[in-house]
Image: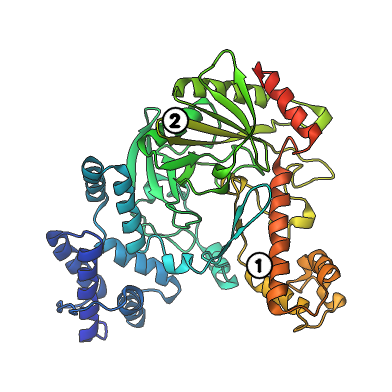
């Protein structure tokens, strides 16, 4: 038996009280959850909760997890898995959450319902806000449109010990991926996160079964994911436009977009059809139309080239079917479109052209943004012709998917400490030694070009504040350049003429 003390019974009682007050756990389910926790922790009887609850994380959850570790109930290398199990027991079951969601839609509207689900996801630690708040975030004010930049510290890199442990474990095929419906309630493993606290909302998009959940990694307000109930690969087809626009009818206060369906320009999970959305706060939405066009075939649709860094066509209007028809026409044409004069080649040994689509709805007006993408590589651009060039990989090497293409950059966590060291060089707190920096074992080696440029432009006698501003400005300018790399039609006179030429080929005229 564990080394029981009265405090662990009180911690359990406090957790039950917290769940009743914050997670909508009802009276009878609270008794059931309490007994489940007593059994899990091998406690003989409950205690009374404190009149005033202590801090949820440090005063309740951490105390329960530490007790479980100290008494051999939980693996010290799997504290988060055990914590999720505990909080899953006090979170209302999926069907009750769905009922409460539907009740709120009927009484107060869909925005109140999504606020409820988001709040629940935060308060049961599915969305770990203390970790999210560690992210470093700022707005880059740029002439071509502001960008939002986040250094991601909420997903710490795995230690060598963790990596070795994962490799030693047997491979399993359940769930098939991180997005499958079977994750609902999954207890997790060392390589697959626990999902006892996740709650979802089922829905139909284009008369197909889908479900919506919030992302545990919040990169913008109400960051949600719409996921196909079937494990099927990502594909941009006419069905995509219908699903995205169906979603915005269900949730008009949200946008929804799809990553492209090809490597390099697509998302990190191409094996399972899913879309990402949330509040309409991404920078691309603030941009005006650069040039307007029209189609005689579909006069109800407003067509324009968006004033943005990459190549975006915006379709808007009140007739959803007409917008979908124009989008389908553009997709079909773009799949096979080449213009060697500006380097656009649709196919070599594989198809290269695809689209990143995003849907919104405002006051009964539908909008569909189509970001034209191409994933071709060549000898000079082994990572992608429309991918950040290698001189920018010190800032961002990963693919530029949906979120970044819309102006919200997620940069690797390593940059936090590396920026500090570069600031020390520019402010003279650390001596400049290019031989030392050139050593591949030095984490600043990848930044050698950036450091040389910054030293040339600013010297090494700056105040810490000016040094930091110089580094941040460099990162901001690099993010602009990255987005410009992704433009298949560059924002030059030649590039924009080629863009118009593509639209003209579809009988879409200025």
Q: Is residue 119 visible?
A: yes
Residue 507 in the image: above or below residue 372: above
Q: Position of residue 437 (x, y in %)?
A: 81, 74
Foreground label between 2 and 1: 2
199 or 471, which lies in front?
A: 471
- Say whether residue 55 is left or right of residue 502: left
Q: Residue at x 68, y 56 (%)?
A: 396
Q: Which residue is mark 2?
A: 365
Within-10-Å neighbours for mark 2: few <14, some 14–19, many 20+: few
Q: Position of residue 403 (x, y in %)?
A: 56, 48
Q: Quadrant of the C terminus?
A: top right
- Say whether residue 46 is left or right of residue 77: left
23 or 499, which lies in front?
A: 499
27 or 6, which lies in front?
A: 27
Q: Which residue is mark 1?
A: 415
Q: Residue at x 68, y 65 (%)?
A: 472
Q: Secondary structure at mark 1?
A: helix
Q: Position of residue 497 (x, y in %)?
A: 77, 28
Instruction: Report which quarter residue 286 is drawn in.
Output: top right
Q: Secondary structure at mark 2?
A: strand
- The disc label shown at residue 278, or none: none
Residue 348 in the image: above or below residue 392: above
- Say whether residue 262 is left or right of residue 185: right
- Say whether residue 280 is left or right of residue 112: right
Q: Position of residue 356 (x, y in %)?
A: 59, 37
């Amino acid at each position: 038996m564990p080394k029981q003390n009265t405090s662990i019974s009180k911690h359990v009682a406090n957790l039950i009280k917290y769940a009743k007050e914050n997670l909508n756990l009802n009276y009878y389910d609270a008794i059931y959850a309490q007994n489940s926790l007593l059994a899990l922790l091998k406690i003989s009887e409950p205690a009374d909760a404190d009149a005033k609850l202590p801090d949820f994380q440090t005063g309740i959850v951490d105390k329960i997890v530490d007790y479980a570790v100290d008494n051999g109930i939980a693996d010290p290398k799997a504290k988060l898995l055990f914590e999720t199990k505990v909080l899953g027991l006090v979170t209302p079951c999926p069907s009750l959450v769905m009922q409460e969601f539907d009740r709120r839609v009927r009484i107060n509207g869909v925005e109140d319902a999504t606020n409820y689900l988001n709040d629940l996801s935060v308060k049961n630690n599915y969305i770990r806000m203390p970790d999210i708040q560690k992210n470093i975030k700022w707005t880059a004010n740029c002439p071509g449109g502001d960008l939002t930049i986040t250094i991601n510290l909420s997903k710490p890199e795995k230690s060598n010990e963790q990596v070795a442990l994962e490799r030693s474990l047997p491979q399993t095929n359940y769930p098939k991926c991180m997005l499958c419906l079977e994750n609902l309630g999954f207890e997790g493993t060392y390589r697959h996160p626990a999902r006892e606290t996740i709650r979802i909302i089922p829905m139909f998009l284009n008369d197909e079964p889908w479900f919506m959940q919030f992302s545990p990694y919040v990169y913008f307000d109400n960051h949600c994911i719409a996921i196909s109930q079937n494990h099927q690969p990502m594909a941009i087809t006419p069905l995509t436009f219908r699903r995205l626009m169906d979603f915005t009818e269900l949730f008009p206060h949200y946008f929804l977009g799809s990553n492209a369906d090809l490597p390099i320009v697509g998302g990190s999970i191409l094996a399972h059809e899913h879309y990402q959305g949330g509040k309409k706060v991404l920078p691309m939405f603030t941009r005006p139309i650069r040039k307007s066009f029209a189609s005689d075939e579909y006069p109800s649709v407003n067509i324009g080239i968006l004033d943005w860094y990459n190549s975006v066509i915006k379709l808007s209007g009140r007739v959803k079917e007409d917008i979908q028809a124009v989008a389908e026409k553009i997709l079909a044409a773009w799949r096979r479109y080449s213009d060697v004069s500006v380097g656009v080649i649709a196919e070599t040994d594989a198809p290269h052209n695809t689209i990143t689509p995003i849907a919104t709805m405002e006051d009964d007006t539908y909008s569909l943004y189509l970001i034209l993408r191409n994933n071709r590589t060549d000898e000079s651009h082994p990572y992608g012709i429309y991918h950040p060039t290698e001189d920018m990989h010190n800032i961002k090497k990963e693919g530029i998917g949906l979120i970044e293409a819309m102006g919200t950059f997620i940069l690797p966590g390593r940059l936090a400490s590396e920026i500090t060291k570069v600031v020390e060089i520019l402010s003279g707190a650390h001596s400049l030694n290019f031989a030392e920096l050139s050593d591949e074992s030095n984490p600043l080696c990848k930044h050698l070009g950036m450091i040389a440029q910054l030293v040339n432009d600013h010297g090494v006698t700056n105040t810490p504040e000016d040094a930091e501003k110089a580094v941040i400005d460099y990162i901001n300018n690099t993010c602009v350049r990255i987005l410009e790399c992704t433009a298949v039609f560059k924002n030059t006179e030649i590039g924009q003429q080629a863009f118009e030429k593509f639209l003209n080929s579809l009988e879409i005229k200025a």
